[in-house]
Amino acid sequence: MNLKYKILPLTVLLAVGIALTACGSSGAPASTPASSAVPASSHVAEEGVTEPINMLTWTLDDLDREDTVTFIPAEITSGVQGGSLAAKIFSYDLYKKEDVENLAVGDQITLHEEGAAWNQFVTVAVKSIEKNDQYHLVSINGGMEEQNGLDLLLDDDTYRTMTFDDYPVYYEMGEKTLPLAEDVVLKDSSADPQAEAVETTGASAVAAAINADPDNWTVYNTTLVVQGGKVQEVRRIWVP
């Protein structure tokens, strides 16, 4: 069987080494854009609008596919019970490198606001663009501090959204209960920034490790690796 690997936006700490300073914009604030909520099957990209490449391209049902290994940022909400964990699943916006670098004042860009649902997004007019080539940053409409502002960071070959702490702007895909695979592996390097990952193998041992620290599996430090609706790996990293 040929496996497809779908790496949905991962939780990553980026050592950019600078703090973003949003530039104030003059004039009246832009009007609040309307929110959209449409099923993925009916979505058609609007001409002339830059959209995330991963917008409305998958749902939680895709985690049940046997032919796809999926990496997802998640918050484990209630530990492991009966061999399954309940989790909130998240994603964040990714844009083609060329789309961002070709943006001009007067264009439009679609984005998810922090905490939005997967099918709730806004389209805003681009009124200003500032680029920091040294750190591969692009600030749109004054950046994250401004209404309708957006900061983007080049990560490999795509741009992703960025908040004050360098995290992506997460939006929620929904909640799902996922059984642990019998040979599931926990890779936990959350003890400190230089910690080597401690590996725990087997459903019972991994469940015990998660339940021993039930409140510290967040979207900022936890990634689930899922295939065929089962958790194959749980990864937790250190966060400040």
Image (tube, rainbow, N blue to C red):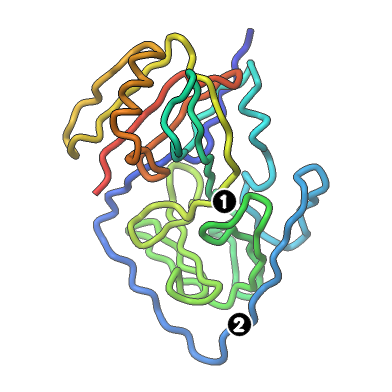
- The image position of residue 220, as x and y in percent, is 38, 45
Disc 2: CA contacts within 10 A as few (<14), some (14-19) or many (>=20): few
Badge 1 marks a residue whose secondary structure is: strand
Quick one: label 1 or label 2, which is nearer the N terminus? 2
Which quadrant of the structure image shows residue 37?
Answer: bottom right
Q: Quadrant of the N terminus?
A: top right
According to the image, label 1 marks what residue? 95
Q: Which mark is residue 202?
A: none
Kindly report the distance in space between the C-alpha atoms of the residues bearing marks 1 and 2. Answer: 23 Å
- The image position of residue 224, as x and y in percent, is 46, 29
Task: Specify the amino acid type for callout 1.
Answer: Tyr
Number of labels in the image equals: 2
Q: Depth check: 82 or 108 in front?
A: 82
Task: Specify the amino acid type for callout 2.
Answer: Ala
Which residue is depicted at the point 53% across and 49% down? 92
Q: On screen, 109 above or below 16? A: below
According to the image, label 2 marks what residue? 30
- The image position of residue 182, as x and y in percent, is 46, 9
The answer to whether residue 12 is left or right of residue 28 is left
- The image position of residue 52, as x and y in percent, is 62, 51
